[in-house]
Image (cartoon, helix red, strand yellow):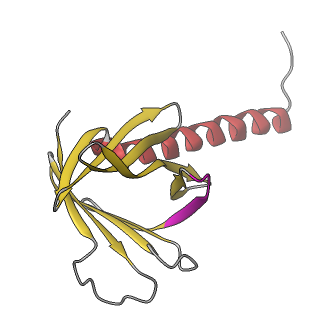
Amino acid sequence: MKNITVSGLLVIIISIGIGCSNENEASKFRNNYRWLVGKWEGRNGQVKLVERWMWNKNRFEGSGFEIDGVDTLFSEKIFLESFDGTDAYIAIMNSGRMTSFQSVQVDSVTWRFENPDHNFPSIIQYTQESDSTITVSLFARGETAFRGEHSYQLKRIK
């Protein structure tokens, strides 16, 4: 039988603790946003708004579309990921331009992500109204109060 030194045992205990801590953070992150998984649809006038979200290994992956009739007006790839305990919302436009937003608020019904260097949106906020309804609000840089023109409601359809 091998002898384990006190320092060797300490390294093993610390390694196990770090692994558990990372697993706990990953589990907490996944649980914070688990409700988002599915297909969501809404309307802004004649424009149909669609978001699809799924869990994939260590992050949430999604897509967002604005559709007018048969024409896609806007599309993006969207991700929710945790980096060193900080949650981030990442949007990649069709042009390949990527913008990231850092989580500034997470509570039981509101998730708010901010990028003060980005003009619009500077803040993206998701509010869970019910298990089947969310409100997405977009704020321009410098807005101190929400005016409502950049807000839409989505309903879960799957």
Q: Is residue 87 left or right of residue 73?
A: right
- Kindly indicate the quadrant of the structure image that contains residue 143: bottom left
Q: Main secondary structure of the magenta part?
A: strand
Q: Residue at x 63, y 40 (%)?
A: 17
Q: Nearer the viewer, residue 28 or 35?
A: 35
Confirm whether the magenta stretch covers residue 96.
Answer: yes
Q: Is residue 34 left or right of residue 103?
A: left
Which range of residues does the magenta coloring cover? 95-102
Q: Is residue 81 above or below residue 6?
A: below
Q: Nearer the viewer, residue 102 or 43?
A: 43
- Kindly indicate the quadrant of the structure image that contains residue 73: bottom left
Quarter holding the C terminus is: top left
Q: Residue at x 57, y 62 (%)?
A: 99
Quarter holding the N terminus is: top right
Residue 28 placement (x, y as % from top left): 42, 46
Tell me how many marks there are. Answer: 0
Q: Is residue 140 above or below residue 99?
A: below
Q: Is residue 53 above or below residue 148?
A: above
Q: Nearer the viewer, residue 81 or 124?
A: 124
Q: Residue at x 46, y 84 (%)?
A: 141
Residue 5 placement (x, y as % from top left): 86, 31
Q: Residue at x 28, y 42 (%)?
A: 70
Q: Residue furthest front?
A: 70
- Kindly indicate the quadrant of the structure image that contains residue 8: top right
Residue 155 placement (x, y as % from top left): 16, 48
